[in-house]
Image (cartoon, helix red, strand yellow):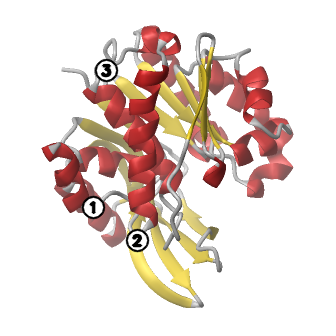
């Protein structure tokens, strides 16, 4: 059976609004995606690291209770589970302060064996983190060689702008291993200095065959060698945008899995197929933006599954 894997950072998100804490949620971009995928009943496993501490226990139990297999997580004893303080502004967009205490030994696991057409999601700083780069690159490149479907989301934050010269080559290496690149307008502006979907595709097509470019309320653009299209997003007043991009990815992965779409055919798809992929991404992201949750609700997942 085709399987789904996510590799990424784990944090406990503590969300503040108007100076007051509103919620505490297991977080990290790929973790958020995996929980939504797990709630859809799909076979998803999480590859990460967090402490062998009380916060780590909460996250571990949460993953298991939501259909995510955490058996490939490194529970380290010498550090602690990372915390992320998320401060929402008047538009309910978040700025972050992180508290991290990792051990010297990182991601000390035996990686799972990936099969052809398995789906692997990766992204954010975890995908270019120097301390784990060798292990990460070996896993992703090995998965790609076996014919896995690789979804990569750079999710490059402005806080790393001062490191761009050193990190940009790692982003490009990841793009070369990618089946589907999902980047926001901010990602492409921060990394490559481009300002629209066509400029982003001019950059991306040198490294990969399929790009989904998200531009907030402006819409979602798809660019491949055989298709160029734009899809609308829903107009809403968000409660929190913390999990929006993560759940857009989760929705796309869900559609790709449910429609049995394979990596080698992705760049050949037309409007009907991309409408399903993007539409599910937009639906997931919209739902998550209407609460402080980082993932789709059990009720919403049940509604989608019933359809």
Residue highlighted by disc 3: 113
Secondary structure of the residue carrying tag 1 is loop
The C terminus appears in which quarter of the rendering? top left
Residue count near mark 3 (Cα–Cα under 10 Å), binned few <14, some 14–19, many ≥20: few
Q: Going by the image, does 198 lie left or right of 295?
A: right
Residue count near mark 2 (Cα–Cα under 10 Å), binned few <14, some 14–19, many ≥20: some
Residue highlighted by disc 2: 291
Image coords of residue 44 (percent x, y) = 27, 38
Badge nearest the viewer, 2 or 3: 2
| Residue drawn at (22%, 37%) of the image | 42
| Residue drawn at (24%, 57%) of the image | 300
Image coords of residue 192 (percent x, y) = 82, 35
Q: Quadrant of residue 226?
A: top right
Say whether marks 3 and 1 touch (CB < 8 Å). no
Image coords of residue 246 (percent x, y) = 48, 49
The N terminus appears in which quarter of the rendering? top left
Q: Nearer the viewer, residue 144 or 228?
A: 228
Whole-Å distance between the Cαs marked 2 and 1?
Answer: 10 Å
Say whether marks 2 and 3 touch (CB < 8 Å). no
Secondary structure of the residue carrying tag 2 is loop
Question: With respect to residue 276, does 157 lie above or below?
Answer: below
Question: With respect to residue 285, does 277 lie above or below?
Answer: above
| Residue drawn at (61%, 45%) of the image | 219
Residue highlighted by disc 1: 297
Q: Is residue 149 visible?
A: yes
Say whether marks 2 and 1 touch (CB < 8 Å). yes
């Amino acid at each position: 059976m085709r399987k789904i894997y996510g590799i990424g950072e784990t944090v406990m998100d503590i969300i503040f609004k108007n100076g007051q804490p509103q919620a505490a949620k297991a977080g990290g971009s790929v973790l958020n995606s995996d929980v939504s995928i797990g709630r859809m009943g799909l076979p998803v496993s999480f590859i990460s690291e967090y402490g062998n501490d009380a916060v780590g226990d909460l996250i571990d139990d949460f993953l298991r209770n939501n259909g995510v297999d955490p058996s490939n997580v490194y529970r380290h004893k010498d550090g602690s589970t990372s915390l992320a303080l998320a401060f929402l502004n008047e538009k309910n967009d978040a700025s972050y302060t992180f508290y991290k205490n990792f051990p010297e030994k990182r991601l000390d696991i035996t990686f799972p064996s990936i099969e052809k057409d398995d789906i692997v999601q990766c992204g954010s700083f975890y995908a270019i983190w120097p301390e784990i780069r060798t292990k990460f690159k070996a896993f992703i490149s090995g998965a790609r060689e076996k014919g896995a479907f690789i979804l990569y989301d750079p999710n490059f934050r402005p806080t790393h702008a001062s490191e761009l010269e050193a990190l940009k080559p790692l982003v490009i290496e990841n793009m070369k291993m990618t089946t589907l690149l999902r980047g926001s307008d901010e990602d492409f502006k921060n990394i490559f200095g481009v300002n629209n979907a066509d400029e982003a595709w001019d950059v991306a097509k040198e490294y990969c065959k399929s790009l989904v470019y998200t531009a907030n309320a402006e819409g979602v653009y798809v660019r491949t060698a055989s298709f160029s299209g734009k899809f609308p997003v829903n107009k809403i007043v968000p409660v929190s945008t913390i999990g929006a991009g993560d759940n857009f990815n989760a929705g796309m992965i869900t559609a790709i899995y449910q429609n049995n779409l394979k990596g080698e055919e992705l760049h050949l798809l037309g409007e009907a197929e991309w409408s399903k992929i993007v539409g599910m991404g937009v639906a997931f992201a919209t739902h998550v933006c209407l609460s402080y949750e980082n993932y789709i609700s059990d009720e919403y997942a049940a509604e989608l599954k019933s359809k």
